[in-house]
Amino acid sequence: MSFAPLHNDTFLRACLGQATDYTPVWLMRQAGRYLPEYCATRARAGSFMGLATNVDFATEVTLQPLERYPLDAAILFSDILTVPDAMGLGLSFQQGEGPKFEQVVRDEAAVAGLAVPDMAKLRYVFDAVTSIRRALGGRVPLIGFSGSPWTLACYMVEGGSSSDYRHVKTLLYARPDLMHRVLAVNADAVAAYLNAQIDAGAQAVMVFDSWGGVLADGAFQDFSLAYTARVLAQLKRTGTDGQVVPRIVFTKGGGLWLGEMTGLACDVLGLDWTMSLGRARAIVSEAACARHARADGSKHAENPVTPVHPVALQGNLDPNVLFAPPEAVRAQARAVLDSFGAPDPAGQTGVGHVFNLGHGISQFTPPEHVAHLVDEVHSYSARQRR
Amino acid sequence: MSFAPLHNDTFLRACLGQATDYTPVWLMRQAGRYLPEYCATRARAGSFMGLATNVDFATEVTLQPLERYPLDAAILFSDILTVPDAMGLGLSFQQGEGPKFEQVVRDEAAVAGLAVPDMAKLRYVFDAVTSIRRALGGRVPLIGFSGSPWTLACYMVEGGSSSDYRHVKTLLYARPDLMHRVLAVNADAVAAYLNAQIDAGAQAVMVFDSWGGVLADGAFQDFSLAYTARVLAQLKRTGTDGQVVPRIVFTKGGGLWLGEMTGLACDVLGLDWTMSLGRARAIVSEAACARHARADGSKHAENPVTPVHPVALQGNLDPNVLFAPPEAVRAQARAVLDSFGAPDPAGQTGVGHVFNLGHGISQFTPPEHVAHLVDEVHSYSARQRR
């Protein structure tokens, strides 16, 4: 498979800790309900899954935000629950109620019945990746994604969204053996899913550990982090064009575990707004220095072009900032960039920064505020480099 | 006002960082819907507010968990929203929907109309404190409580519970001046409210910053922490009997800011389950040592009997652990005690530990599992001291 050459590689360079002229920006859920054109396409599709499973619709909505804003990456339009759906759990979306699974996974029999699904069932996703990559024509890179093994397990055991994670934590504490089995299957499924997205044209991949932050210290390491690591260990390092495919891991509410997450074999760690970016940068930088020191000692220096540990951060504006007037949006964008601090000089081992929200953009966001955000990130971060 | 002498001061001693024979334990929302006897009293009261505003009912339900379990403290049965209700916002509870305010505080006029309420409107709370203290007869100490200024503001601006805090954060980012005014009024109201509880017989007080953890780094310090500090600065140090009244501050999701919270003028910091207790103990211990070093240098050593900065931790079992079988509950209780580590030897400046959940107990909790939890905390922590 061959695609048009990439015109704007700022996002990919920042993911790999390389120098850029400005800080690249994209937004979680950038193709979404805050855009009237998205709502129009969704109405034509009839339903959310009708949108997500149709290659043309998925391509159309993925590109919509790029028509409005000079974003530095596109992200596949899809749902986080496609993998458990392919496992046969029966995903549906009730009007205004969020996702629901027909079958829940709460006992020995249900767990025993789980297996890595045939990736052919997810062909609509891979076809969408290829279609979007072609439609982008090299404008910006395309990010593929999946839920983390733990996050998928939350939905599979709860049967949908949850406010207290009662069922999944009951399984975890009462039958850790079953929980580990669910997570092992999920990890292998997620790895196969992301590899197939890479084969279809994804230029970066992101693991959304949306619910890692609800776990207790200790449980997070054993039931979320360990299985994210299992995914990463199986991922392809390069894409269809031979280029390195950066790997992003985002644990919402995971700031306390950032030190441990620097041991992951990924390039970028995503952060929500509760964590100081400056403090996060110091933690990642220190871990990188410690690795370099060890590598020098053992004469096995890492290849700086293909990092195997985090060298960049992604985040972390509170999406609610976007409800404030444009001048306040711009001030808060500058505060995030200032918190990260001036970029490292070119040629030095540094920590990269990809600007993003700390969570998905709200459906109530005024679209014109997003234009101010993107403009301020680009212009202020370019000034930071002068 | 005079009350019976206190028989079990283990909780108060642990709050002040003093040596105890075992780790004291109480549970957030220990008087609650998981107890059939609570549900029976609530049915007689007709409604939640009928229960909370009636001195006899409030006394009855506060004591119910103590009849079942050898807990080391009682906590006033009341609602977190009594103060904004007394401000005239019109609190009600819809069946199965949580709290609702008739009036929301979202614009200049509504903010201008706010004032510290006449404490006479909250007399039912103070009468309940006195009644409960008498009914306890010195068995265990009674904890009074309030929501934090920020947490109350969340409900006042949102008009009830929220999943995204959109309105309160919009106000914060769009009109920080109005937000500061709401928080200043709330802080002075909370201080007056807690002082009146102390005058009525409360032997410790707790500030629930339930929603501090939804704020961005920077915003937390300015809009939550600063106003909790404003409350603490106004609190009485001693109760009706001349004894020191320990002050507990609990910010759910606040683990990342624990270092900054060690600067608060309180005795105990509460933690949820995401934070390692061992790491938290090291942070609090280090801050205490740094203060001692400074105090020695300036010849103004603190009185060790009345700490003015945190010397104890409270927490932090995930309440979902209580859904697991008794042996798993006991194992997780030991894990929390082990994470905190062996207590400091008597006579040394140490960090105290009050065992608790990291959040309120779930209404679905099997009551007999709580008995196992309390027993394991008492017996294992006593063994840790041998």
Image (cartoon, coloured by chain):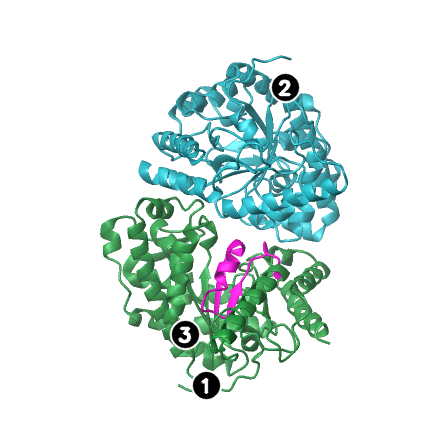
Chain colours: A green, B cyan
Residue drawn at (73%, 61%) of the image: A327
Can you identify the residue that label 1 sits on? A3
From the image, which quarter does the N terminus of chain A lie in? bottom left
Q: Is residue B254 visible?
A: no
Q: Which residues are magenta?
A: A248-277
Instruction: Specify whether residue A256 is painted magenta.
Output: yes
Mark 2 surroundings within 10 Å by alpha-carbon count, few (fewer than 14), some (14 through 19), many (20 or more): many
Report whether B47 appears left or right of B370.
Answer: right
Report whether A339 appears left or right of A61.
Answer: right
The amino acid marked with disc number 3 is: Ala
State the separation of the CA atoms marked 3 and 1: 14 Å
Mark 1 surroundings within 10 Å by alpha-carbon count, few (fewer than 14), some (14 through 19), many (20 or more): some
Q: Chain of mark 1?
A: A
Residue depth check, mark 2 versus mark 3: number of the one nearer the observer? 2
Residue drawn at (36%, 74%) of the image: A196
Quadrant assignment, res A187: bottom left
Residue A1 or B298: which is nearer the viewer?
A: B298
Disc 1 element: loop
Q: Is residue A368 visible?
A: yes
The amino acid marked with disc number 1 is: Phe
Residue drawn at (59%, 70%) of the image: A351
Q: Chain of mark 3?
A: A
A110 above or below B121? Answer: below
Q: Say the numbered circle drawn on residue B200.
A: 2
B376 above or below A285? Answer: above
Residue A134 or B380: which is nearer the viewer?
A: B380
User: What is the x, y in percent for residue B282?
Assistant: 56, 46
B23 above or below A332? Answer: above
Can you identify the residue that label 3 sits on? A128
Q: Say the numbered circle drawn on residue A125.
A: none
User: What is the x, y in percent for residue A294?
Assistant: 50, 71
Q: Nearer the N terminus, badge 3 or badge 1?
A: 1
